[in-house]
Structure formats: C-alpha cells, structure tokens
Image: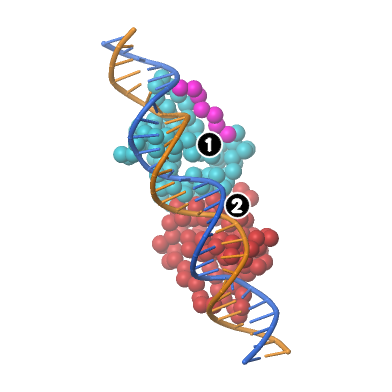
Chain colours: A red, B cyan, C orange, D blue
Amino acid sequence: MRAHTHPAIENVALEDIFHALSDPVRLDIVRRLARDGEANCAALECGRPKSSMSHHFRVLRDCGLIHTRIEGVTHLNALRKKELDGRFPGLLKAVLAAG
Amino acid sequence: MRAHTHPAIENVALEDIFHALSDPVRLDIVRRLARDGEANCAALECGRPKSSMSHHFRVLRDCGLIHTRIEGVTHLNALRKKELDGRFPGLLKAVLAAG
DNA sequence: TCCATAGTTCGAATGTAATCGAACAATTGC
DNA sequence: GCAATTGTTCGATTACATTCGAACTATGGA
C-alpha cells in the first residue's frame, strides 16, 4: 500500500476535528491512541468489518488528528499530539480528560 | 412560547457537543456568545431564515452548550460556561482560543 | 381587539455520512 | 511464484442532517 497523505497542521480546521470526534467509534479510537500510543487498525477494531474501520481511520487522518505510517504490511496510527497541542492548545487534553 | 428544556449537565455527552460544534454556523454562534454574553436569536442570524437559525439554536440547546431564557417575546441565549467548565475542564477555553 | 414581533414547528427536498460486502493492492514468508 | 496478512477502494443501501417556506404560538403595545 502506498503511503497516506496528511494535512499540514496549519491547514487543520477545528470544524473537521469536531466532526471526526462526534462519532463514538472515532472518539474511542482517539482515546485509545492517546493512552496506548501507536496501534494498527486491527488492534482497534471492535467487531466491525475492516472497511468500516478503514473509513473511520481515514476520517481521523484527513482531519489531521492522526498520522499513519506503514511498516511492512501493517499501518501504525498515532495521535498527532504535539502538533495538535501547538495548533489548538488544551484541546486534546480536554477531550481526553472527559473520557 | 413555552420555556425550553435543557439537559442536566451530567447528562451532557461529549459526542453531542462535538457534533454541535462541527457546523460552522453553530461554532460561530458559540464564539459570539462567549465574547458578547447573552444574545437573542435575531441578533445572531446572518442572513439566514428564522427557521434555520431556530434549528441551530435547538441543536446547541439540546446538546447542553447553551441555555435559553425567555423574556417577553425574545429568547435570550447564553453559553452554559460554568457548568461546562465543571464537566469538561478546559474544553470551552480550547474551543474559543482557536477562533 | 388587532397588529407587529420573535421564535417554533411542520414537512419536503436536498445533501452528507455510516455501514458493509466484494474485489483489489502491497508486503512477507514459504 | 503462491498464499496469507493487512488494509484500501468501490458501490450500494440506509440513516441522519441541513435548509427553508409556510403556518402557527405567545407576548406586548396601540
């Protein structure tokens, strides 16, 4: 698989982040990544089909919340924590504190 | 008009707040309320029909972000700032700082 | 009482998002 | 090369949101 594209942090829009986080599955993914660090897609699927999870990861990636790097055959996802903290100070902390 | 109902702050769900804030019109309303304090619906409509604005205010009310009190014939909306700060510390601040 | 004002509710049209199976693509190991 | 693994893409279905006009409700004032 080819590498994914990620938006530059300065192009990340708050509305898009909110939209991404308004889905419980995605909010859960973000919280797990915050707690456990990097994880591949399979590790976070909770009984849902691959295509559904792939969709959710794409939304999270496209809005700027996560970064996906490819290692062999697995995709490792991580929160773009530092970048997000720089662009929207306090946001991630507030999101994660509430969980 | 009869008074509106508002969710108890402990029943407010983060997903619902994110959904409400994912719409640019509503995000703008929240920011204006944060800056200017109480405002009636008419003061915040930006060329849109009343029914559309009424819908957006309802979403903001139902998710727990704003409180609406009735004074005569006008509805005065205000951010539920203190309650929200208690329930989701730092969230409002982060949202408003980014604007 | 009658009218203006401020906002809600209804209903329909349109738009957008979620879901998931099936087919596909890239890498690893045999 | 072939099969297994990991995830993507496509397409269809379904569900949910937005938008807005029109009719309605409640209050206040002439």
Check disc 2 and report the residue beneath it: A24
Q: Residue at x 47, y 49 (%)?
A: B22
Residue B89 marker: none
Which percent across, then down, holds residue D22?
A: 35, 30
Q: Residue at x 57, y 76 (%)?
A: A70
In this view of the protein, can residue B21 be seen by the observer?
A: yes
Check disc 1 and report the residue beneath it: B62
Subunit ID for the residue under disc 2: A
Q: Residue at x 68, y 60 (%)?
A: A46
Disc 1 crowd rating (10 Å Cα; few below 14, some 14-19, many 20+) is some
Subunit ID for the residue under disc 1: B
In the image, the segment drawn in magenta is: B1-7
Marks 2/1: CA–CA distance: 18 Å
Disc 2 crowd rating (10 Å Cα; few below 14, some 14-19, many 20+) is few
Closer-to-camera residue (A65/C23): C23
Q: Is residue D18 above or below residue A81?
A: above
Asked where in the image residue A28 lies, by quadrant, the reply is bottom right
Q: Residue at x 65, y 60 (%)?
A: A48
B87 is within the stretch colored magenta: no
- In the rendered structure, the answer to whether residue B10 lies left or right of residue B79 reads right
Which percent across, then down, holds residue A53?
A: 60, 63
- In the rendered structure, the answer to whether residue A75 lies left or right of residue A3 reads right
Which percent across, then down, holds residue A88?
A: 47, 55
Marks 2 and 1: same chain? no
In this view of the protein, can residue B90 be seen by the observer?
A: no
Q: Is residue A17 above or below residue B87?
A: below
Which percent across, then down, holds residue A95?
A: 57, 51
The overriding secondary structure of the stretch rendered in magenta is loop
Q: Amino acid at mark 1?
A: Asp
Q: Is residue A56 above or below residue B24?
A: below
- In the rendered structure, the answer to whether residue A28 lies left or right of residue D23 reads right
Are the two marked residues, 2 and 1, in contact with CB atoms closer than 8 angstroms? no
